Image (cartoon, rainbow, N blue to C red):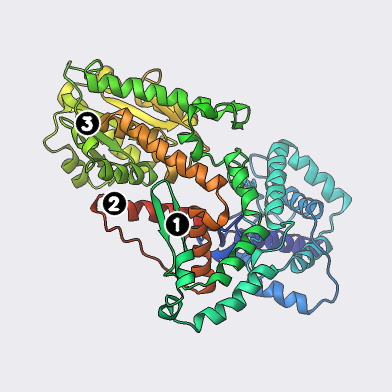
Amino acid sequence: MRQQRHMKRQSVNLITCIINASLLVSVHSFAGRGQSQISRRAFLQIPSASQGVSSSRRSLSQFAKAKSETESSKDITTDDFENSIQTELHIAASDDNGAESNNGHKLHNLRVPQIHLPPRFVPGMSHQQHGEIDESIHHNIHISESEEAQLHHNIHPHQQQLQHAKQSVSTILNNIMPSNPLVSATPEWKRLQKHAEYIKSTHLRDLLQDKERCDGMFAEYDGVYLDYARQRIDKETMKLLMDLAEKQNLKGKMDAMFNGDKINFTEERAVLHTACRASRDQKGTVFVDGMDVVEEVHEVLDQIKYFTEGVRSGRIRGYTGKRLRNIVSVGIGGSYLGPEFLHEVFKTEPEGINAALGYSLRFLANVDPVDVERTCADLDPEETLIVIVSKTFTTAETMLNARAMRQWLWDFMGNDKEVVEKHIVACASTSATENVKAFGIDTEKYFFRFWDWVGGRYSVCSAAGAVPISLLYGYDLFEKFLKGANSIDKHFVSAPFEKNIPVLMGLLGVWNMSFLNYNSRTCLPYAEALLKLPAHIQQLDMESNGKYM
């Protein structure tokens, strides 16, 4: 009996170590997240009976060593792994008061969060080794009939927890056992690796002597010109990169994104920032969970247009009846980097200069009180409108600044709920409606929604960018920006890869990082109006393709 308990604890620890190790890996994406790299490190701690989890963090090298000690193995299956997990959950669970185990130790409730992980979540471990671990788990689990009956008696109040845990395990297995091999294992990738050895032996100045090569390495669309002749590539490089894109079904993945498929598998969401700039005639073409997303987008845009034109015309005024001329946008990350970049562009355009006369726009992102003080300096609260941008309306930094700005308004105009209703508006996800209402904002008139399928880093085309930019420059100028973004979207989804600017830049990024081993890149805007572009692009790139530290 004592030996059996020891084996059970071992298998619980083994499972815990596997899941802990899974959180060490993030994916550097190309055409479906083919290229992996170590990223954000986190540990999922699962409590186990009496021993905690300290003994469960065993080195993965032990698993690798086990491979050399056995000659037979099998592929891990979803059913096998789920059954193993569920058995261990039975062992670890107890009633709400903490049931006594046979050895006198307390058994604590086991809560397994639902997590979604990218493919191949254990670095350096093959599917064969996963099979050996699974075999070991089953080998070490032996429960007598009396123990099993007692365990089922104890687990009865926790059936819902167990069902949730089983679903979590199923999701993990779906992501760690991809049906297709890693992109780095394909023949197309291997050919590029071999070709890179040749390119590394050449010099860029020699490549530039080839006039035919240089004349062919450009793409142009709607006023955007891409010259990539100064990349360390030749015609063969581009051919091999196109072969890789075809192998990875890049076109199919692009279409899936535009069609609203839930390609964000970690959050089970669609990725549809493109719908935020879709034209009205595209209504009825994209649906998510039965909702016509383009129609929904234009309902919000119409609401924003009506509101911002009302503020600029004087129809909508502040608590004391003064016109609202100062806009403070409160948000962090994508909630301000994109809008601030666009603000810097528009304020040097003749149309933007004229439209902004008599108005001001400031961004508050830092929780440092000095930033709050500098933002509010020389502003009249009676003429100030606060725009709070937070997808969940729970972001700690944003809400801290939001409360500071609300108090600033109350200090000057009194603690009246109408002060908030007339001077603060919200841009947030539809799922945050109750949080917005609890803050005191009028959700019927001054809540401008966007959706969970709009990533924060892409939100400049949503209400997050539309409200502050339209308040300062007018809705018509912002609408021109949306039309430009929609134009490049159409180019991206329809142009052949050889002349497709976004595809070419993406493939060159893969070439430089994965084959030439360039670990960094720089963005140098010569146009002063684009001075905020690098910060915006940095977030887009790192949050999309992974961060390495």
Residue 478 visible to the viewer: yes
Query: Marks 1/3: CA distance?
Result: 34 Å
Amino acid type, callout 2: Leu
Taking 100 as reference, is 261 above or below it? Answer: above
Q: In which quarter of the image is the N terminus?
A: bottom right
Q: Which residue is drawn at 80% across and 56% down?
A: 77
Give the structural element (helix, strand or loop) at label 1.
Answer: helix
| Badge number at residue 355 | 3
Mark toward the start of the polypeptide (3 vs 2)? 3
Taking 223 as reference, is 523 above or below it? Answer: below
Seen from the viewer's position, the closer of residues 140 and 430 is 430
Give the structural element (helix, strand or loop) at label 3.
Answer: helix
Residue furthest to the bottom in view is 201
Tell me whether circle 3 and circle 2 mark residues in contact (CB < 8 Å).
Answer: no
Q: Nearer the viewer, mark 1 or mark 2?
A: 2
Q: In this view, does 83 lie to the left or right of 45?
A: right
Residue furthest to the right in view is 145
Estimate the x, y position of residue 219 in percent, counting from the top left: 46, 56
The residue that mark 2 highlights is 530
Seen from the viewer's position, the closer of residues 510 and 29 is 510
Estimate the x, y position of residue 307 in percent, counting from the top left: 32, 21
Query: Marks 1/2: CA distance?
Result: 19 Å
Q: In this view, does 376 lie to the left or right of 493?
A: left
